[in-house]
Image: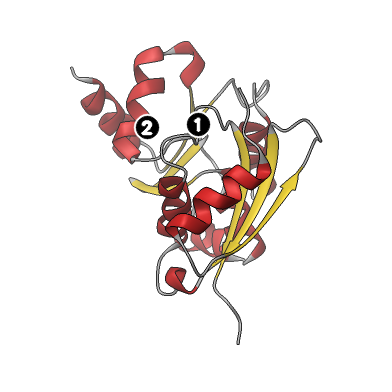
Amino acid sequence: MSVHDRIDEIVKGNNVVLFMKGSPLFPQCGFSSKAIAILDHLNVAYESVDVLQDMEIRAGIKDYSDWPTIPQLYVKGEFLGGSDIMMEMYEAGELQELVATHSLAKSA
Amino acid sequence: MAMQADEIEGMIRAALPDALVEITDLAGDGNHYAARVVSESFRGLPRVKQHKAVYDALGGRMGGVLHALQLTTAIPQN
């Protein structure tokens, strides 16, 4: 399977997926850490992919998204942006709206 | 390898001539910057496209020599 197909499968197989450096418990970069903090604050149920554990995905995701940096957030198969965009959307209330619209919060 | 603030500003303004660009050196180490870019050209574009326009202006340096650029984009308020 090509790396594009692998990423495609991950992106389309999960409602919310964050490509990041490190794990949610131990993020290895400030930007990934910020992305996790926003998702956790909104109580979003998400999958994460540690690109440091998979060099093929680390390189491939930048082409797949046409976006140069990590973290990268996908919601419902669509690329939303990196941690700066997540923060802007959070501050504008747009991320909260998205979570509500698609029922992305963790179930109690 | 790092980039100077005025080099970052120059590249952004070369691609987006109307842009107001504010660069802040977050850590004082010439390696962690915040940039706020305000440009009329962002009007009507989703955030991803606004940020992408700035990344494109930096010509592939983003994610390479320029690891830590915290970016905010906005449209001018009249």
Give above or below for A101 relative to A64: below
- Which residue corresponds to the image point at 54% horizontal and 27% vertical from the top-left? B65
What quarter of the picture does the N terminus of chain B occupy? top right
What quarter of the picture does the C terminus of chain B occupy? bottom right
Q: Which residue is mark 2?
A: A62
Identity of the amino acid at label 2? Lys
The image's colour scheme reads: secondary structure
What is the CA distance from the residue labelled 2 to the residue labelled 1?
10 Å
Q: In the drawing, does residue A66 fall left or right of residue B1? A: left
Q: Which residue is mark 1?
A: B63
The answer to whether residue A37 is seen in the rendering is no
- Which residue corresponds to the image point at 62% horizontal and 67% vertical from the top-left? A92
- Which residue corresponds to the image point at 80% horizontal and 35% vertical from the top-left? B27
Name the image quarter holding residue A45.
Answer: top right
Mark 2 touches mark 1? (CB < 8 Å): yes
Label 1 secondary element: loop
Residue B26 location in percent, x, y? 77, 41
Mark 2 or 1, closer to the camera: 1
Give above or below for B3 relative to B10: above
Name the image quarter holding residue A62.
Answer: top left
Label 2: few (<14), some or many (≥20) within 10 Å? some
Q: Chain of mark 2?
A: A
Identity of the amino acid at label 1? Gly
- Which residue corresponds to the image point at 65% horizontal and 26% vertical from the top-left? A29
